[in-house]
Image (tube, grey):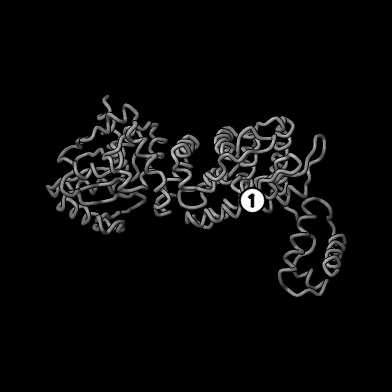
Amino acid sequence: MSAAGAILETIAASLAANPLATALIRAARESGARAWIVGGAPRDAWQGRLAADFDFAAQPAALDAMLARARSLQAALIPLDPVRQITRAALGGHGADLEPVGESIEANLRRRDFTVNALALEVEPDRLALYDPLGGLDDLERRRLRLCAPGAFTDDPARVIRAYRIMLTMDLLPIDAARNALRAAAPRVADVAAERVTRELWKILGHHRSHAAVERMAGDGALGALLPEVDACRGVTQNQRHHLDVFEHTLETLKVMEALAADPPLALRGLDAPVAADITRLSVAKLAALMHDTGKPSTRAQIQGRITFYRHETAGEAMARAAARRLRLPRAVERGLRLLVLHHVRKPKVSPGAELDRRAMWRYLCDLGDWTDAGLLLGMADVDAARGPAMTPERRERKLRAAQGILTLRKELERKPPRPPLDGDELIREFNLAPGPLVGRLLEELAEVCAIGDLTGRDEALAFIRDRLEKRAR
């Protein structure tokens, strides 16, 4: 089957599963005016991917008929761009974006970003006809990225980040003109509305080989425009545990993380859990991999010939917070990002042959909470990405052993949760305390000693609380 035939077959299958789009096409045909399926659906169909949503460009009579049909179906109509008159219709989990075609379909397609996105399927009376005025289908087959017009990035710099996402997901390479235009436009990414840029960034980080796109972005200058904190790590040399400078180590950490996520050495869980719309814990962990050492340039010191980065995780957490606010990330995403950066160097104390520090493991679980698995993944990736002469196999083994210990303790506590022999009311009554934060802190300390097995009975618990109160009073 030809590429065009494959696209038409996949689009037909997508429409069969999408009653909203099917109804809109029927309305366009009944109007007698012209309409086209545009956007990503024809492009994705070339890869055999079914489209969940459709974009339509239509002549006025067809557009009016499609909007009227959407209203009759009681679909929600959401204005997306009043200037360009783009409206989204949504019904039963399906969506369709509707816009006027303008002076002609060819002019409409020439205003788009890349030729692979400038394919259209005309809604003819009894069939769909492929329309490809810019050779996008040939570019797909040759796996190359070309611009629809020389000023595509100038018209909309957000297309710079989209280019890396398209190249990643479609396995394309830019022709020389596109690569030169990318590099020239990269600094303007910093001027694009945060929501538009991060929408593309999360799509990149959601891919299993996002490191390939990030490395391209780093080479072209787009990563520095998006995350200047990461770019500031270039050329910052490290100690003998590392074979790369901080910037190159950062890129390597992301690459290693994706390899570990694909074939984890431990039974990690919840990495695919959503944190916000279309953002998973794994995607946030990947962003944390990019941000985890951003505190190193400001904390680098040389003491008696040794390079140190004391408290770089604290400095990095502050930079992660600033980046999250600048990029307007959801609060839940910001929280996870900051936790992962702040705690990426933590591990229970363990030396060869020694027992793991149960208290430290408990505190790690309490501090990381739902982000525990992502934190362990980042910690392992960080260590595995450091291959300097001082990073011995024994160090790696201890890190893995510590991570396994944390997961084992969590499983144990889930199977048999610690039950402190005193509750808040009893603390207030026994020690004549006022309700407040102090009672909460004492209960947390009591839960910790119960979890690590240091006490079990009521008398021991009372003695422990009495001791804590006496120490606080000194």
Of the pair 175 and 272, the residue shown nearer to us: 175
Q: Could one spot residue 209 in this view of the protein?
A: no
Furthest residue to the left?
Answer: 32
Residue at the image position 49 percent from the left and 52 percent from the top:
276
Looking at the image, residue 437 sits to the left or right of residue 185; the answer is right
Looking at the image, residue 53 sits to the left or right of residue 319; the answer is left
Looking at the image, residue 117 sits to the left or right of residue 384; the answer is left
Residue at the image position 77 percent from the left and 52 percent from the top:
451
Q: Could one spot residue 26 in this view of the protein?
A: yes
The picture places residue 101, in percent across and down from the top left corner, at 19, 48
The picture places residue 191, in percent across and down from the top left corner, at 40, 53
Q: Quadrant of residue 135?
A: top left
Provide the residue designation for mark 1: 342
Residue at the image position 45 percent from the left and 45 percent from the top:
201
Looking at the image, residue 63 sits to the left or right of residue 113; the answer is left
Q: Across the whole image, how many numbered discs are drawn on residues? A: 1
